[in-house]
Image (cartoon, rainbow, N blue to C red):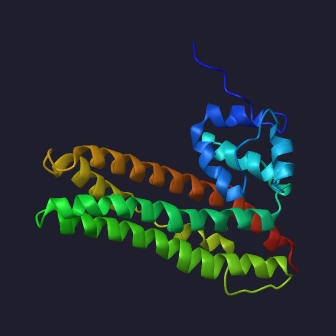
Amino acid sequence: MSKKKTPFSKDSKFAELMTDDRRLLQLLPRFGIGLGFGDRNVEQVCQMNHVSTELFLLICEIYSDSSFKPNYSELQQIDMGDLLSYLKASHQYYLGERFPHIEEHLQHIIEACGQKYGPMLSHFYDEYKQEVMRHIQFYEEEVVFPYIEALLNGQRTDSYKINEFEHNHTNIQDTLDDMMNILLKYLPGDILPKERIEISYDIMELSDDLNRHSLIEERILVPSVESLERAQP
């Protein structure tokens, strides 16, 4: 008999949400929430850590169910400053922790591959990482976020609109597929098989996380900024 999923509510036990869906654990450092929450509910843990309960629950919903879309009233409760802080913390997590971790282990495999597969695997990984970095660092951090912060400060500009955001979300799935094919299908079976399984799992987890990060931006950030734009004189 399957375990009944804990509902996403401010009164839900925080620990139960984490154990029901382990993916939610990776959200905690981005919100600055530490472990040791005891039997406290979501609202209590969020208040202790100066986190918006409404934003935390919406993001948990999207991470747990990729089909979830917040309604207008739910979006109206979101503080844009809190959302930007979360997104920036996510960027720091990807670039400062996840990619370095993957690179450290992937390099062992690349060195063991020799000239036949090593340069090819390195190429596809570098292409994958650069696509992610271009979007995060050179588009979101340097264009989108400053634009939103200007709106929050009452400054209006006609040089950019948030409806351009979706067109700049790059699709890097083909590059990811090429890299995974080399790791799983084409390298000889005796080349670090255990490490290849572990790094493949890490890469797929990162890809899944990045996809949900994109959903948060598309379903929370974009409509919220559109409301800000409409409110500007």
Q: Residue at x 71, y 80 (%)?
A: 147
Q: Is 205 placed left or right of 147 in the picture?
A: left
Residue furthest to the front in view is 36
Q: Position of residue 213 (x, y in %)?
A: 59, 57
Residue displayed at 74% across by 31% down: 7
On-image quarter of the C terminus: bottom right
Q: In the rendered view, would you say 45 is above or below 30? A: above
Is residue 207 positioned above or below 153 on the image? above
Q: Is residue 223 visible?
A: yes
Q: Is residue 46 left or right of residue 86?
A: right
Q: Residue 143: x, y in percent?
A: 63, 81
Along the line of sight, the residue nearer the viewer: 184 or 144: 184
What is the x, y in percent for residue 31?
71, 56
> How many numbered dots are placed on residues in this image?
0
Residue 224: where, in percent of width, then height?
76, 63
At a point 65% along the width and 55% down the height, the residue shown is: 29
Q: Is residue 224 left or right of residue 219?
A: right
Q: Is residue 70 visible?
A: no
Image quarter of residue 64: top right
Q: Is residue 142 above or below residue 226?
A: below
In the picture provided, is 190 more to the left or to the right than 159? left
Q: Residue at x 83, y 39 (%)?
A: 10
Q: Quadrant of the N terminus?
A: top right
The extreme top residue here reads 1
Of 112 and 221, nearer the camera is: 112
Of residues 138 and 116, the one nearer the viewer is 116
The residue lying toward the viewer, choosing from 76 and 119, is 119
